[in-house]
Amino acid sequence: MNTLFKSILIGCFSIVFSLMEDLLPSPEVLRQGAPLAKRPNIVLIVADDHGREAVGCYGNTSIRTPHIDQLATDGVRFSNAFCTTASCSPSRSVLLTGIHNHANGMYGLEHQIHHFSSFDTIHSLPVWLEQAGYRTARIGKLHVSPESVYHFQRILGTGKVNDPASIGRSPVEMARACYDFMVEKSDTPFFLYFATDDPHRSNTISPDGSPIFDGTKPNLFGNRPGGYPQVGDHFYQPREVSVPTYLPDNRACRMELAQYYEAISRLDQGVGRLVDYLKETGQYDNTLIVYLSDNGAPFPGAKTNLYEPGMRLPCIVKLPGQHKRSFVQDALISWIDVTPTLLDFAGVDLSTIVTQGRSFRSVVEQESVRDWDEVYASHSLHEITMYYPMRVLRERRYKLIFNIAHELPYPMALDLYRSYTWQEGLKKGEKVYGKRTVAAYLHRPRFELYDLQTDPDEIHNLAANPKYGGVLQRMQTKLKQFQKQTRDPWLSKWEFD
């Protein structure tokens, strides 16, 4: 690793580590709350790279996701839900701690040479819930570390990340592996973290452990000949898929989307089987179920980007004792809010803990919500070679992106760069990708300001337009304040660019 870059990262680690000490609760305070008998079971389902444009209940009429759609029918569908960082490990760290990646230490990917991890002093959702009397278990993809921070009492099944042999590629089998845990006779509720590998791109592994992605043909997204046990086949023809506007509508992209859809339909069946088991055992009505994804679809323009396709995601909440069915909530929430929300449902006294998010429990079924009109995002790295920190303020109308390392070309993830979709465009010398030029995608200015009402595809940057100078200044001030409040090591980049 470059010596200067390594020194910068070590310095960031040291600063955040020291500043985080006063955010840590004592375990004793977490035992307070409602009686255990009244607390719901909690199931958090985390898909891997599932974009909201590829779910039936979010408007895609081409894909078959009946079980996820039914969950939305039974519960609440959030129309403005956002991850805070469009990268696997950092996003999951935020989900499970309620602390931004720049403050919890998980700046990039956890596995192999990337080797990022949260600080040892961080507390996480499963640890808090265990201390509050819950039985905790996880299955599938964890992708955060260290284990002492993200500790679960039970590990029901695991496997190599994105390996077709991993149980995370067989969500129906995952659901079956959870059955015994869910039906255990106990006076305490349970927390189940159900994290699939689907619909992430699949890859083969070289002898040295590095991933190999073949850009000469469509990725299979975990699909394999013969399928998976108890999973019905859902094949898609390229002509059937709906191509979102951020992607090129060509043969290569359609072929990959067809494979992507198949992986999502497999994932959907796992969700259906898990719900079936909850109903069969009489626990569905007393279980809080949350379905979401870590980040957007695994295509250039979405994953690793903080444009809308990368960060605006599906989020479905089925409440225990649901009152409003098929309700659509338009409050702006983000993954920083998930941990405090689930702790709130678990009866934990939120005044005894500190996170950087807030509970949205009170607004899940509320109409005409107020004061939920903005979210913040913070992306630092993905792979170790992908240094490109971005900070974002996303309001209902306007969105500001601060590209901290704007003088560098935008770095692409290995699996996205070598994707059939991107490689075919390179071979043909195409200058446009979706609605953006390739040059604009790879070379970004320091600030990007978009009017999402008139420009939902985020093409026309208003940052240099004098007409929007007041909007830009207002949002810059708020974004800088966010960085101060969350103790962002990159705050200094406002002065030392």
Image (tube, grey):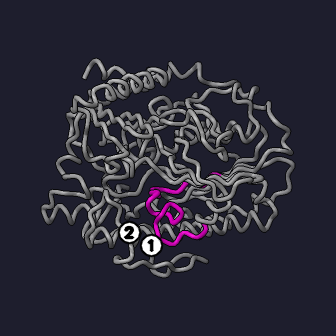
Q: Quadrant of the C terminus?
A: top left
* Residue 193 at x, y percent in the picture: 63, 51
Residue with the most extreme left position: 429
Badge number at residue 242 = 2
Q: Nearer the viewer, residue 5 or 289?
A: 289
The answer to whether residue 444 is above or below residue 16 is: below
Q: Secondary structure at mark 1?
A: loop
Q: Say which residue appears at 66% left-offset and 25% top-offset.
A: 25
Amino acid found under the numbered disc labelled 1: Ser
* Residue 439 at x, y percent in the picture: 17, 48
The answer to whether residue 315 is above or below residue 247 is: above
**Magenta span has 47?**
yes
Residue 11 shows in the view = no
Name the residue tied to disc 1. Answer: 62
Quadrant housing residue 366? top right
Q: CA distance from mark 1 to mark 2?
A: 6 Å
Q: Secondary structure at mark 2?
A: loop
**Magenta span has 164?**
no
Q: Quadrant of the N terminus?
A: top left
The local crowd at label 1, few if under 14, some if 14 to 19, many if 20 or more residues have their Cα within 10 Å, is: some
Amino acid found under the numbered disc labelled 2: Ser
Give the mark nearer the N terminus: 1 vs 2: 1
Magenta stretch, residue numbers: 44-67
Q: Nearer the viewer, residue 156 or 482?
A: 482
Q: Say which residue appears at 48% left-offset and 29% top-offset.
A: 103
> What is the count of numbered marks?
2
Q: Does 250 sit left or right of 135 as displayed? A: left
* Residue 141 at x, y percent in the picture: 54, 54
Q: Nearer the viewer, residue 31 or 2?
A: 31
